[in-house]
Amino acid sequence: MSDDKETQQKKGTEHPISLIIDEVVSIFSGMGFEVATGPELEDEWHNFDALNVSKDHPARDMQDTFFIKGNSLDASAQVLGGSQPDHSQKHARESFVLRTHTSGVQIRYMEQLVKDGKKPPFAIVVPGKVFRNESTDAGHEMQFFQLEGLMIGKDINVANLKYVLTEFFKKFLGEDAEIRLRPSFFPFVEPGFEVDVKHNGKWMELLGAGMVHPNVIKNCGLDPKEWQGFAFGFGIDRLTIVKFGIPDIRLFYQGDLRLNQF
Amino acid sequence: MKISYNWLKWYVPEIPEAEKLADIFTMHLCEVEDIEKKDDDSIFDLKILPDRAHDLLSHNGIARELAGQLGITFNDPTPKYKIPESKPTNLKIELQTENCRRYSGRIVRNIKVGPSPEWVKMHLESIGQRSINNIVDATNITMYDCGQPCHAFDLDKLVSEKLIVRYAKAGEKITTLDNKEVELKESDMVIADENNVLAIAGVKGGKIAEVDENTKNILIEVANFDPVSVRKTSRKMSIITDSSKRFENDLTPELCSFAMVELSGLLVEFGFTDFEDVVDIYKNKQQERKVTFSVSLVNQKLGADISADEIEKILKQHNYVYTRTGEDFEITPSAMRLDLNIPEDMVEEIGRVYGYDKVTPQAPKIDFIPSTNETFTKIMYARNKLLSEGYNEVMTYSFCNKGKVQVLASASDKKYLRENLNDGLKDSINLNNLNMPFLGLDAVKIFEIGTVFLKDMEEIHVAYGTKKEIKEMTLDEYCKDASPEIFSERSSDFLAMLGQTVSENTSGSTNQVFKMWSLYPFIARDIALWADENVSPESIQNIIKENAGELLVKEPRLFDTFKKEGKISYAFRLVFQSKDKTLTDEEVSIPMTKITEKLVSMGFEIR
């Protein structure tokens, strides 16, 4: 009996962030969302301008950006390793940043849709790593994971957003989960919300959300009079911390297997 | 922005008590970062949203907003300020740049610098500001009250009664009020007399024309500067002031008129009445805007059923200038509401006041068939395969000490982006090797899937291995032997793969709680014994656990078993660790002795 135990291949342990990404994506897939991905090094158009974050506007200060030195990426640059269309975007000779959010993939997805001659409706979620240039502490890291959601159609509205997020958190945290929207501001949505989630009797601020700003839809080549919808985004690391009670975000990127407890 | 409850009450006497007000702010306006009780006052620290910085970085603005929100009276302070008749002036103001969008200046003579009245000191101190003297305090009160930054120069320190707003010449310098010498660049807008730079426009005043205890005559400035210009200068100099913060968020030049009345009125209240005429240079007047929207747009965006009458009530309460034609509205936003430009902005206005909590959740109906994402599916495929081969997943930093791609101005000393996963995995293996007994592993087998940054591209890599060898390749390369259908657009394997990991690992995981490890080193000890063949290893494990005490932090791990002459040998590895100190050998020998004695007393033979 013990011999079997020794020779049989024991399954490896998974990183808690991966577990949560799998679970979150699985819930959204069940609600009809498609997964989309995009590059971590992003041009300023996709990370800022197309998202209605204009140059020199204080809104760009809301995120501390890692800018890339020089034009180290030349015009022939492209993303390899995942060979789907939204990854083969040619990098033009302009300034690049480490993406500060996964919202740039909204733009990439819609640009591709228009290029392929297709139209909404669609619903996507975008899991991915993002970067912020700020000093680190138990709640802040220079790198972390985000998940972005985007649903566009003829009449996708705030009531639909509330439904999708409520369903998600009921599945993710338990039937007692509730959400509430508070007014907020992000340049790429109007109206914009901060979303609090009630779990175990406590409100936690977990997401940003809103109705996609008409300028964003227009910037992708779609008519904002015809199409509307919502977007939301949250930190996967934060959800992982909430779900498992992990005390410090910095534990995630130490390569320490003591983290893999689940 | 710090807001005093008592200050607000001047304008909106009917506001509810502080706790209730905090809820109203939170649900209908912005986040309340803090409420501080100060004597009989409550100070709210409000996180004003960037799109409302035009009008809400002021008590006046917040009061007006609350009056609209709650349908209560707003006491307009304007009639309160009685300005005496002013004398003709010789003041000249020359604007050499259009980035000064308005400049109002006024000379006030025969003033006396001294302490401020008590209410002024109290107001300033309540929001964490220091009272300096009556003149400076008057400019600050005006700013925190109506949002318009103001400045006062000592008139007699100017070379003549002429002010020039221009861009600095290369090499010009200014010593700021806090005694810092700043070298100016041609991109910095300044206020100057005919010889000297007196202030960095919209950012900070200078020492040369500082108001001091001997000042007799002053020149007050109420001006409006281009947000981008102020922002660039302020960032470049790293001088961020209450003034620069307001200007960089774009203030309406229209606000200058009220601020000049308020500032003048305060000076009158302080006993100074020798006023000269205001010189007001305001060439390009802010144009009136119209925003039109319909009831159906509001409901279509919110998914609500708000009636035209309800919308009209909200507009009326907020003192909007509007016309209604059936179900359509046309509003003329007040000059300060620079955030209202498109119909969607009015959807937010209505929704925020109406209350998002009144919007009933509704399942979306869309006709959409999701495709499979190749990259994400490949990552999942690779992860599942490596896990099944016994590799453990890690994530390491994308930042490192060397590489082809460098980031600018990092808060960290690691300024490059990784060009491989290999280096990170090596460090991870070394770290985990030290913890093998703790982890219950005989060998460290790990992997990472992540993006690396080469000279002109980024690639997703897969790396896996042990201390002996790490293999690294692109994700595509790793997945090349898999059947391509798995990754195709209409693959059904995606959900199956996802479902597998989720159900195996996280179902019911809400009850699982992370156990933080101790930061002190652990000590591992082995114990081996002979037992009768019918004794299960679990029963021995239990005896060990019952006698080990609280320093035993891991389940005793059976790592060796063999049979000989009707007996069976079991070997267990025990890991001891303290939460608050480094254990000594002696401290570990106490539970070890206890376990050994217990096992011997039960007839086991310790090897």
Image: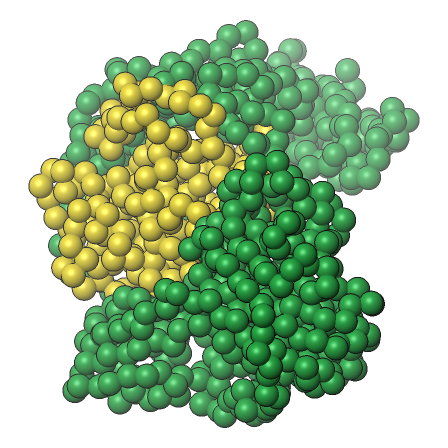
Chain colours: A yellow, B green
- Residue A246 sits in quarter: top right
User: Where residue B544 appears, x then y in whole percent?
Assistant: 74, 33
User: Where residue B442 appears, x then y in whole percent?
Assistant: 60, 17
Foreground residue, B552 or A77?
A77
Residue found farthest to the left: A117
Residue at 48% x, 91% y: name it.
B72
Foreground residue, B13 or A101?
B13
Residue found farthest to the top: B468
Q: Is residue B585 above or below residue B170?
A: above
- Residue B308 sits in quarter: bottom left
Foreground residue, B237 or B206?
B206
B168 relative position to B27: left or right: right
Q: Is residue B291 above or below residue B415?
A: below
- Residue B302 sits in quarter: bottom left
One can see residue B152 in this view: yes
User: Where residue A24 appears, x then y in whole percent?
Assistant: 38, 47
Residue at 37% x, 41% y: name it.
A47
Residue at 52% x, 50% y: name it.
B166
**How many numbered tags mark residues here?**
0
Q: Quadrant of the C terminus of chain B?
A: top right
One can see residue A246 in this view: no
B244 relative position to B71: left or right: right
Q: Is residue A84 above or below residue B70?
A: above
Residue at 17% x, 34% y: name it.
B489
User: Where residue B142 appears, x then y in whole percent?
Assistant: 62, 74
Foreground residue, A16 or B58?
B58
Q: Quadrant of the N terminus of chain B?
A: bottom right
